[in-house]
Amino acid sequence: MPAPSPSAAPPSHVDLVLPCYNPPAGWASNLVAAVTRLRALVPDVAWRVLVVNDGSPRGVTDADVALLRQSLPAFEYVAYPENRGKGYALRQGVGRTTAPLVLFTDIDFPYEETSMAALLAVLRNDEADVATGARDEVYYASVPRRRVLISKMLRGATRYLLGLAVSDTQAGLKGFNARGREMFLQTTIDRYLFDLEFIFLASRGAAGLRVRPVPVRLKPGVVFSDMNAQILITEARSFARLLTARFK
């Protein structure tokens, strides 16, 4: 019997985890609008939203949090004073999830809600334990040139040095079931390469998790920041650690 389509699937719960650091103006109202569109696309899902404030010194106000509490049927807010990195923030949020399926993306919802719905459908139809966004060439039109170069170099290194079948590990949209959640919580990298570490762990033979890339598209007008030299140095060390682990 074929797997049910998302519209025919039984009602379910999904936790959506959103790391937050110095978000742009209007982020809270944008989040409410995005979740509203997402609920309309997948109406038989009960969405719970968890926002993790990763030590933002600016951009998050009491009014923002109050708006989210008032507007979202199920909402949790987590905050701590020191900036630790996106990977750390996501582990704090994922560790608080209770739903059978978990998605995470960035606080500004850079990917189209239809992409999020497609990624969720893969998980609901039990086609994967981990579903990861896969970006096409259109994505790179919105990214600074140095970041494009780094991204493409990392994709090549991921495939040829780490031996991963999924080369695009850095898209900011992923989801997983309970097995994927358990693996995600085993990650240790706090910043940029936490995604790569997650896919690396999930793809190793002993884990046996099914990892599937899902094509995703950016919303029009999304602009990504450049990466500074300190981040590159730190993440080069993180990559070297993963490479060493591969050959152990």
Image (spheres, rainbow, N blue to C red):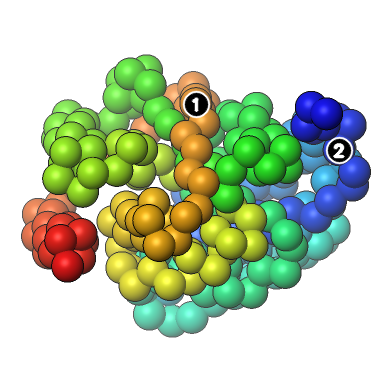
Q: Is residue 83 visible?
A: yes
In the rendered image, the quadrant that contains the N terminus is: top right
- Which badge, 1 or 2, is on the more N-terminal residue? 2
Q: State the image coordinates of residue 115 (x, y, percent, origin top left).
A: 59, 30
Tell me which residue sits at (36%, 56%) in the image.
204
Residue 80 image offset from top left, x and y in percent: 48, 80
Q: Quadrant of residue 160?
A: top left
- At a point 48% along the width and 64% down the height, the residue shown is 184
SS class, disc 2: loop
Image position of 184 (left or right of 86): right
Give the residue at x 43% y 31%.
134
Q: Amino acid at mark 1?
A: Pro
Mark-to-mark CA distance, 1 and 2 = 22 Å
Tag shown at residue 9:
2
Residue 238 makes an appearance in the image: no
Spot occupied by residue 149 in the image (x, y as percentages of width and height):
15, 32
Q: What crowding class fits label 1: few (fewer than 14 Cα within 10 Å), some (14-19), or many (20 or more)?
A: some
**Above-or-below relation of 14 to 34:** below
The residue that appears at 40% across and 62% down in the rendered structure is 206
Q: In this figure, which residue is indicated by the disc labeled 1? A: 215
Give left or right: position of 86 versus 112: left
Where is residue 86 drawn, in percent x and y? 40, 62
